[in-house]
Amino acid sequence: MKTELASFFATFLAWAGASAGVALAVMLVYDALGHRAVRKAIDALPDVPEADKAFAWSCMWRALVSDWKIRFFDLSAPIVMAMVIPFVPRSANKLPPPFSAWDNNISLNGDSGGVWVPANHPEFIRYASAGEGVWVDYHDVLNWDPLVDCLQVTYDTPFYDGDAYYAKGHHPRSRWARYVWVGLRNRATKLALDLGAAVNGPIDLISGSLAISTGQSGHFLLRCGDAYHFKSIERVSVLGRDFARIRSYGFKLEIALKSPKEGDRVAVVAIGWSAKAWKEA
């Protein structure tokens, strides 16, 4: 019996080690190819001075190193959160301190909120057919104009009683919604922000345009101090289907530029390539 048990554990450890080795090799290849593609794209920008290209390249390298510090928490989140979430109090807005590296940078309970539409409101019938009122998630609001005077709260508000937009049918504080949020959908985002950069000055667009999307090809290169953010979107066709190939490297200055807040920090990002369905603009 002991021999069989020892053999089982030896086999398991060998399998786990081999799997980890394959995963590590895949990540190294992914990073090498993605990093090289980003460098080539930056080097090819005709309107960027050579000094800025050199500083931007140094920033991209810092981003990759920081991203590797996040990898363990990112990849382990589905397993670790499955064991932790069941024991987190419903009243909590953050994970316990020992697990803060897996936490979300906004809240354990999500990043949205809801609006209370009372039964006597003209818009009520658009969302429910009975009851004293209904909570409508921000993402489900059909027309904001008639609801501007209604009560609006975040998911963290204790008396919010609607669903989470990323886990329909489940309250944001439910175990399943929390698991989806920090275990699957947004993994280790607090750590990515902690390893990010502070926005301590103006953000300059030194190349490209911010008007890019999964339906509009293009690129931009942003600069704030010694922090840079390069992002490009290209339309590619695979087996007759169109996709948007996205590269995003550096520090997410795009977010601070679009929604500036005093004392902003922006998360580190090192995405050599990702793909989304192409949507015609």
Image (cartoon, grey):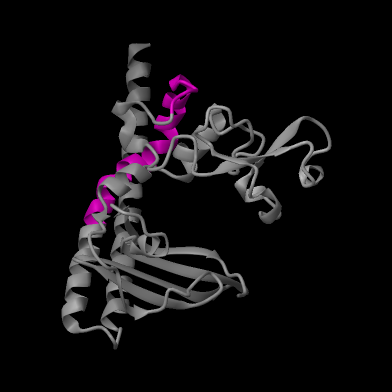
Q: Is residue 72 magenta?
A: yes
On the rendered structure, is 108 left or right of 281?
left
Going 44% across and 78% down the picture, which residue do you hit? 218
Is 14 in front, or is 4? 14
Q: Is residue 237 magenta?
A: no
Q: Quadrant location of residue 41?
A: bottom left
Above or below — where is 255 with respect to 15? below
Query: What's drawn in magenta, residue-wise?
Result: 64-92
> In the picture, which quadrant includes the C terminus?
bottom right
Going 55% across and 39% down the picture, which residue do you hit? 153
Percent of width and height locating residue 71: 31, 46
Percent of width and height locating residue 163: 63, 36
Is 220 in front, or is 144? 144
Q: Quadrant location of residue 34?
A: bottom left
On the rendered structure, is 29 left or right of 232?
left
Going 63% across and 50% down the picture, which residue do you hit? 148
In this orientation, does residue 123 appear?
A: yes
Residue furthest to the front: 149
